[in-house]
Image (tube, rainbow, N blue to C red):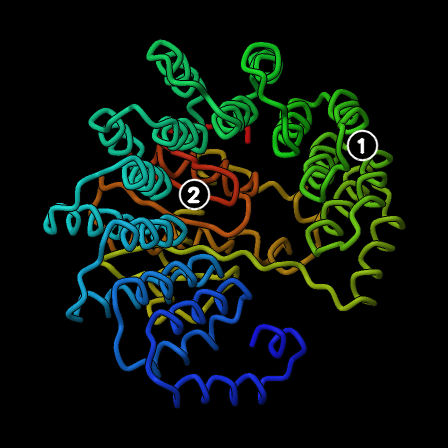
Amino acid sequence: MSTYLKCDRLGLAYQLLDQVFRSDFNLVILNLVIEHLMKLGEYGFAQKVFRKTPVWDVMTWNLMIRGYVRNARFEEALSLFREMLGSDVEPDKFTFASVMAACARLGPCNHALWMHGLMREKEIELNAILSSALIDLYSKCGRIQTAKDVFNGADHSDVSVWNAMINGLAAHGLPFDAIAVFSKMEGENILPDSITFLGILTACSHSGLVEEGRKYFNLMGSYYSIQPQIEHYGAMVDLFGRAGQLEEAYAIIEVMPMEPDVVIWRALLSACRTYRKPELGEVAIANISRLKSGDYVLLSNIYCSLKRWESAEGVREMMKTKGIRKIRGRSWIELGGVIHRFKAGDRSHPEMEGVYKVLEGLIQRTKLEGFLPETELVLMDISEEEKEGNLNHHSEKLALAYGILKTSPGSEIMISKNLRICHDCHTWIKMVSKLLIRVIVVRDRIRFHRFEGGSCSCEDYW
């Protein structure tokens, strides 16, 4: 079957599947078929097998749910789990581990609370895998204090529990907390692994702790005899690049014992955009084999920031020729168990009139307080979301306006975004948090930003 699918011979694959169902029913074989299809990325085909199977056991459900998570079909995984709850098959620890992974990627906090409550209701004992998954889930839905509470009550004998906590703290821009957990880990004689160090290096990178990052990178090999992998070198490139030490970042790439991957070159390219280094940016671009829209945009922005308009236009023309469009910003907010989604300049939401009314009012109030839109961003990026007319209508601003419209004064608002938050929105949301005396949490592609009293937890370093 896998051979037929790889050769795009779907008809023959279906014929073979029909033969399987016409023969004596064997759930073990069908479970193996589902597992294999999911590994091939054929989740649609796996679903057809699942639906045709007359009887399902817990393994069948688990293979489907885990397969959906593996293929980044998180909403399908959650939907199938809800269906499972209505069946006569009880979920087990493996089911909950997979579903929590899906919920962590989706973001809404109600999923975390629901999952945790279900495990208590069904008296599922928290082992290392489930404790790690629950810490990761609460961290990724913005409840870092709850994640700490779960960690404090968990069995600390497995390194995965420590790793989940360190990575959660890193994502929330709490490097000293992450380092403290690492020190406690050493004190309890738990040996760190490569994932532990990746979390510590990420924490240092997100907060500009260059010397600390260098120390832990060296500690890996010199004390723990852990060979740095490509992800660790990437974290070091990101660490130096974010701190403006681009020569150091490039030096890491040159001495790496393995070929740098696209993630590393993109980290360098992003740093070149921030610190306006077009020559090194061109080197990064030349080493990215399959360029995406963001790569072109970053290079174009570098040229525009230096007023090299012809070079910038050349990049834009190349994008047009290749039919490449910039990824559009999308943000979402969960209220009352419903996820509301917004795109830049969006007017499709049924309550958009009220959203824009709130947003325009906030824009006027922030301007009176001295806020100036960062129009340099418009000059550097002439795509949809960065045009002058849309600068005030970025997706995270629309989501925030909706949150303010629908929630009571003083309550916390949490927003998720598919891209990195821009400087203009970051500065504006800081001011809104001060004006409205609200805590606003934004989970962007890179990390969490907690806005409160006119400042952000990232300390303007992200």
On screen, residue 296 versus residue 45, left or right, reads right
Front-most of residues 96 and 151: 96
On screen, residue 200 versus residue 136, left or right, reads right
* Quarter-of-image position of residue 216: top right
Front-most of residues 370 and 176: 176
The correct choice, above or below, for 389 with respect to 416 in the image is below
Near mark 2 (Cα within 10 A), the count class, few <14, some 14-19 or many ≥20, is: many
Q: Position of residue 151 (x, y in %)?
A: 27, 28
The correct choice, above or below, for 93 with respect to 242 in the image is below
Q: Position of residue 27 (x, y in %)?
A: 33, 73
Pointer 1: what residue? 277
Front-most of residues 451 and 213: 213
Disc 2 element = strand
Locate the N terminus by quadrant.
Answer: bottom right
Whichever of callouts 2 and 1 sits on the residue coming sooner in the sequence is: 1
The correct choice, above or below, for 337 with respect to 409 in the image is below
Near mark 1 (Cα within 10 A), the count class, few <14, some 14-19 or many ≥20, is: some
On screen, residue 248 versus residue 228, left or right, reads right
User: Residue 56 has which mark?
Assistant: none
Kind of residue at badge 2 = Arg
Pointer 2: what residue? 443
Query: Is there any visible trace of residue 424 in the rendered image?
Result: yes
What residue sits 52% from the left and 71% below the top? 42
From mark 2 to mark 1, how far is it between C-alphas? 28 Å
What residue sits 24% from the left and 70% below the top? 83
What residue sits 23% from the left and 67% below the top? 84
Q: Position of residue 248 (x, y in %)?
A: 75, 20
Disc 1 element = loop
Kind of residue at badge 1 = Lys
